[in-house]
Amino acid sequence: MNRLDKLFLESKEINITNDDKIVIFSDLHLGNGRRNDDFKRNSESFIKVLKDYYLKNDFTLILNGDVEELYKFTLKTIKKSWSELYTIFDEFNNKGKLFKIFGNHDYELAINKHLKTGFELYESLKLKYNDNDIFIYHGHQTGSWIEQYSKIALFFIKYLFRQIENKIEPIESHKVYKAESNAYCHSKMRKSISILGHTHRPLFESHSKLDSLKLIIEKLIDRYSKSFDDERKLKISNQINRYKSELDKLISSKEVYHKRNSLYEDGMIVPCLFNSGSITGKHGFTGLEIKNGKIALIYWFDILNSQRYLDYKGVKHKKFQDTNFHKAILKKDSLDYLFSRIKLLC
């Protein structure tokens, strides 16, 4: 807690208003562009929307850690493999609209002066909104001392990771919970909103996907019980079955770290913890947008690979230009409303 508070107090502050447009992405894990590069799966869609949507629409881009996969690849190899993407980063940077935070997988950039990406590096940022704080950091700082990575620890970690043939191993369930729980407690203490990456698990208002699905199903059951129209009841029943199918699939998946509920305490959950997820998802990638005084969890996907959110009630989606890429708004809420809830519940 002391380490997080020190980071909070020393963060670079940026004042924002309802006129600002910000997008936050984390965990790109850029590699060599080949089979064992986790970024490659969603590279086409990410590069397209970053250039033709976020850059063209004058968004500020915040990269919240683990941009480069330096455990397994050299910076030279990464920059050569994804030169088009670095050119886009340059365009954001030239407009004064790029903030790059380091994580544990690209921590080497912060300690090795010979490695240069051309962008200023931060360990955290603090957005000031109407005298409220939005604290953005990667999230590895919530773990043990070894996750802070000294130069010696980094050497051994890189050696071990380069023995792994493919995939980044998911963080163990108990470590995910510990990271989130520590971040949640600090955010609650400071009555702030905290935005993390690191765990690859999207969170909105301190709720995981598992929590959110359960809440949606409960609300739909309540609507079903209060409806007297057979046609409407059938429609609600179909919606319940669709969400229940997704819930069952999540529960039965091998990725056990997604199953942990975000119940960090016995009382009312304070809506102070958010996570942008990652760019390395199987069917698309998630991020967080802040604009017009609202924060939204967004999901970009290719309909040739996934059609999950095309007919979900309450999930707005829109096709992007003449591509197969769609943007879905999974959740959205007002910052003023969120901070009011945080202050009243803390």
Image (cartoon, rainbow, N blue to C red):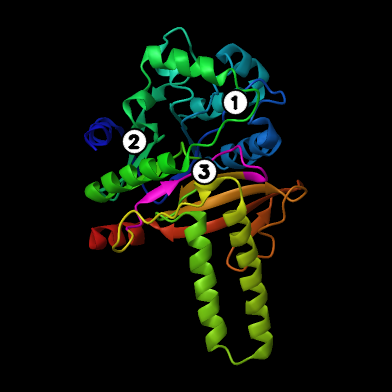
Question: Is the residue 335 above or below the residue 143 in the image?
Answer: below
Residue segment shown in magenta: 270-284
Amino acid carrying label 1: it is Leu
Question: Is the residue 262 above or below the residue 58 in the image?
Answer: below
Please tell me how many numbered marks the rendered image carries: 3
Q: Residues within 10 Å of mark 3 (few under 14, many from 20)?
A: many
In the rendered image, which residue does mark 2 sit on? 142
Viewer-proximal residue, 324 or 194? 194
Residue at point 29%, 58% (across, down): 342
> What SS does tag 2 mark?
helix
Q: Residues within 10 Å of mark 2 (few under 14, many from 20)?
A: many
Mark 1 to mark 2: distance in Å?
23 Å
Mark 3 to mark 2: distance in Å?
17 Å
> What SS does tag 3 mark?
loop
For residue 77, side relative to residue 11 (left or right): right
The dominant secondary structure in magenta is loop
Question: Is the residue 43 above or below the residue 34 in the image?
Answer: below
Q: Which mark is residue 264?
A: none
Residue at point 59%, 49% (across, down): 299
Q: Is residue 118 visible?
A: no
In the rendered image, which residue does mark 3 sit on? 277
Residue 63, position in %: x, y? 48, 33
For residue 275, side relative to residue 49 (left or right): left
> What SS does tag 1 mark?
loop
Mark 1 to mark 3: distance in Å?
15 Å
